[in-house]
Image (tube, rainbow, N blue to C red):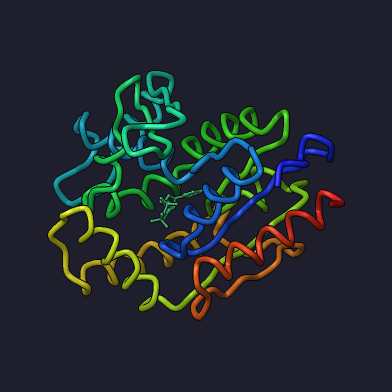
Amino acid sequence: MDNTEFSKKIIVAIDGYSSSGKSTMARELAARVGYVYVDSGAMYRAVTLYAIRNNMVDPDKKIKTAELVAALPDIHISFLPSGDDGIQHTLLNGEDVEKLIRDMEVSNLVSPVAVIPEVRARLTAIQQEFGSHKGIVMDGRDIGTTVFPEAELKVFVCASPEERARRRLKEMQGKGENVTFDEVLHNVVERDRIDTTREVSPLRKADDALELDNGNMSPAEQMDWLIRRFNERCGL
Ligand code: CDP
């Protein structure tokens, strides 16, 4: 199907809980319809990696907020459309950090970094710029509520914490990482807690978002569902 060039371009916002499969869905939809894909979580992860590398994390795991905020103008995040594995890679000041930002150390610190209002304001502005010509699929926590409240298609993805931890464990083990189910489950639950209770742009379903509980759906069923909704919104 590539009749999208004859229809209007839209913005697709896919939000939801950690490891709910948002990124896979969003990436695949973008590839199928010829849209740009942006993984907003990767941007928060890249800022977190910068903080770790530049000694902006206390020994008790508290982020040195003032130092990180002062360094924000020096943090440049961009994307390489297709890395050696064929998927989009995240660049931090020009360096490919795609693998490093998926580490457990980054996963454990990213939600505390993502509560910092100045970090959110800067990343939100960059994300809005990416979407200024529409034709974009972006996934994250606040895309339908804060980044693109006017998005034509908003999806909110959920599944139980155990199901999400099982998926994430499989993905991490596939990459040769040495983690246990309990560690992953703890990280998923803790990030959900911080993401839903923070003051600025907490994770919540936008009133006009479609809810997708994909706990019992195969990836193919999920993609059919999404493509149908996309076509409806484009008037196809
Ligand atoms: O892929 P996964 O579900 O593990 O999470 P992610 O999309 O990589 O996002 C990592 C973290 O960044 C989330 O747990 C949030 O704390 C934060 N985030 C956010 O606050 N706002 C977004 N739009 C995207 C991510």
Q: Position of residue 33 (x, y in %)?
A: 66, 44
Q: Which of 183/155 is in front?
A: 155
Q: Residue furthest right?
A: 235
Q: Position of residue 71 (x, y in %)?
A: 36, 23
Q: Which of 15/193 is in front?
A: 15
Q: Which of 175/39 is in front?
A: 175
At horizontal 21% and vertical 68% (from top left) the residue drawn is 183
At horizontal 45% and vertical 46% (from top left) the residue drawn is 41
Q: Is residue 26 left or right of residue 111?
A: right
Position of 113 relative to 172 (above/below): above
User: Across the whole image, how many numbered discs are drawn on residues?
Assistant: 0
At horizontal 61% and vertical 71% (from top left) the residue drawn is 212
Q: Position of residue 88 (x, y in %)?
A: 43, 36
At horizontal 37% and vertical 27% (from top left) the residue drawn is 91
Image quadrant in which you'd find residue 181: bottom left
Q: Is residue 151 left or right of residue 72?
A: right
Q: Residue furthest front?
A: 1
Q: Position of residue 22 (x, y in %)?
A: 51, 58
Q: Is residue 149 left or right of residue 197?
A: right
Q: Is residue 181 left or right of residue 221?
A: left
